[in-house]
Amino acid sequence: MTLDRATPMVKFAGVTKRYGRLTVIDGLDFAIAHGEKVALIGPSGSGKTTVLRMLMTLERIDGGVIWVEGEPLTHVERGGRLVPADARHLRRVRGKIGMVFQHFNLFPHMTALKNCMEAPMTVLGLPKHQAAERAAELLDMVGLAGKKNHYPSQLSGGQQQRVAIARALAMRPKVMLFDEVTSALDPELVGEVLNVIRKLGAEHDLTMLMVTHQMGFAKEFADRIAFFHRGKIEEEGKPEEFFGNPKNERTRQFLRAVLDAV
Amino acid sequence: MLWDWGYALEILPVLGQAAIITIEATLLGFAMAAVLGLVFAILRMLGPAVAWPVSMLIELVRSTPLLIQIFFLYFVLPKFGVTLDAFTAGVLALGLHYATYCAEVYRAGLENIPRGQWEASIALNLSLYTTFKDIILPQAIPPVVPPLGNYLVALFKETPLLSAIAVLELMQTAKILGSETFRYVEPITLVGALFLAMSLVSAALIRQVERALGRRFVR
Ligand SMILES: Nc1ncnc2c1ncn2[C@@H]1O[C@H](COP(=O)(O)OP(=O)(O)O)[C@@H](O)[C@H]1O
Ligand SMILES: [Mg+2]
């Protein structure tokens, strides 16, 4: 398979997810290009988190196929047919993907530095000094050079989230997923985390998929906005046209509601 | 006279020897219980195909008296070609019996780890082994040290059951001394006192360990 910039970095093809009898993602078709930054917005419960979790392989899918760089993630090809992937395949392909969670999920018994060293050492087999060097660089990049030896409990929410970003980056992912990464933060700490994400976008060739309620940030940062409603993309487009001239009535309702709330 | 100090002093060294056997049985039995209990607890998390037989075994062991398990290992296993000396059979029985209780303690500890820790481990692509070793167990075990310590003391207090298969621990030694001299007051009293002393010492040690573990976490 030839890989070029035209092959989508991520592609959801007819992806369906159910919890019991509730269909939360309904035949989703959605492609994200190399280096593209896409913001997922929409009402609570519309399936935005589920989309990220399926891509991170935290959830099994019930239908369709997810592709990463032209290779099936959720499936493997066997005899010309796609069959559900085993754990080894999932592990190999998800190495391209990193995720930052709403509640940070840092390892509380490790310092900031150790949090960023654990996976590079045990998964990539980096020697300790090299892992420490990479971790220190990344903590520096997120503005936490002075907090290397602090435990998560000794850091503010914004600092913890920045450690979590550094931790994910230490695995050199090609795709980064952000799930409402500023929602659990006090308002005055939101900016420092968004600044780190801006910097990432500017300095790295990362594909980013972010769920956010920060409409201003989405408008300024994303290449494309996708509006979710009941497990489907109701409307998508470039930020200017999406926010400037939303076509869908539901989109207009949603935007009115969130903009009123500010 | 009810209490003979001369006799008490005379048998003290013999009982001291027996106390060492009791301590050995306790430590070996508990080491086995602590390790096997953790294995049981982890196996029960690995899906129904593994969890089911393990749960059956745990239920079986918990629903039958320890004394019967001791007898089983010592008297019945030889019929299947496995012959154990009394001390080994006793330690294995203690270890297996208490492993089932420790498993429950570990399970509570494991269940207390937030789901986000598992999910972060997957997102970082850690192997299952690394996830347990570096992420889950270091967080799950320190909080369960106190209940594990309680089982250590409980196991210790059940070692006299090994006298039933003639392991020369404290109780068996006291019984032998008593039957030789027809004086039971001193041996049994001394055994009780030794158990009391050792229980107090181990309780103090466990508190030390708890405190040391508590310090490792800056929360
Ligand atoms: N583990 C689960 N079990 C059952 N239902 C779930 C589970 N996770 C999410 N859901 C449901 O799936 C729907 C989509 O959830 P989610 O993706 O979290 O939405 P969003 O992130 O857009 O708020 C919601 O209706 C939610 O209640
Ligand atoms: Mg969500």
Image (cartoon, rainbow, N blue to C red):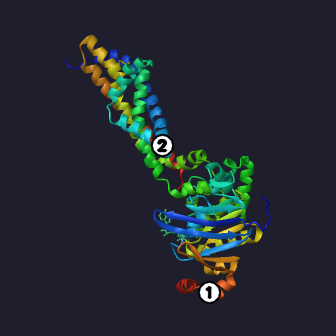
Q: Nearer the viewer, residue A83 or B139?
A: A83
The spot of residue A52 in percent (x, y) is 60, 65
Q: Is residue A63 left or right of residue B154?
A: right
- The yes-or-no answer for disc 1 within 8 Å of ligand 1 is no
Please state the chain letter of the residue tagged with numbered disc 1 in the rendered image. Answer: A
Q: Nearer the viewer, residue B183 or A94?
A: A94
**Which image quadrant for residue A223?**
bottom right
The type of residue carrying mark 1 is Lys
Q: Quadrant of the N terminus of chain B?
A: top left
Residue at 27%, 20% in the rendered image: B186
Label 1: how many residues lie within 10 Å, few (<14), some (14-19) or many (20+)?
some
The spot of residue B8 in percent (x, y) is 30, 18
Q: Nearer the viewer, residue B99 or A85?
A: A85
Report the disc number at residue A247. Answer: 1
**Which image quadrant for residue A82?**
bottom right
Task: Let me know if residue A166 appears in the view.
Answer: no
**Which image quadrant for residue A187?**
bottom right
The spot of residue A42 in percent (x, y) is 56, 77
Q: How many marks?
A: 2
Check if mark 1 and mark 2 are on a common chain.
no
Please state the chain letter of the residue tagged with numbered disc 2 in the rendered image. Answer: B
Q: Nearer the viewer, residue A149 or A8?
A: A8
The type of residue carrying mark 2 is Ala
Give the answer, above or below, for where B208 lies relative to A73: above
> How far is mark 1 from mark 2, CA to CA?
52 Å
Secondary structure under the numbered disc 2 in the rendered image: helix
Secondary structure under the numbered disc 1 in the rendered image: loop
Label 2: how many residues lie within 10 Å, few (<14), some (14-19) or many (20+)?
few
Q: Which residue is mark 2?
A: B49
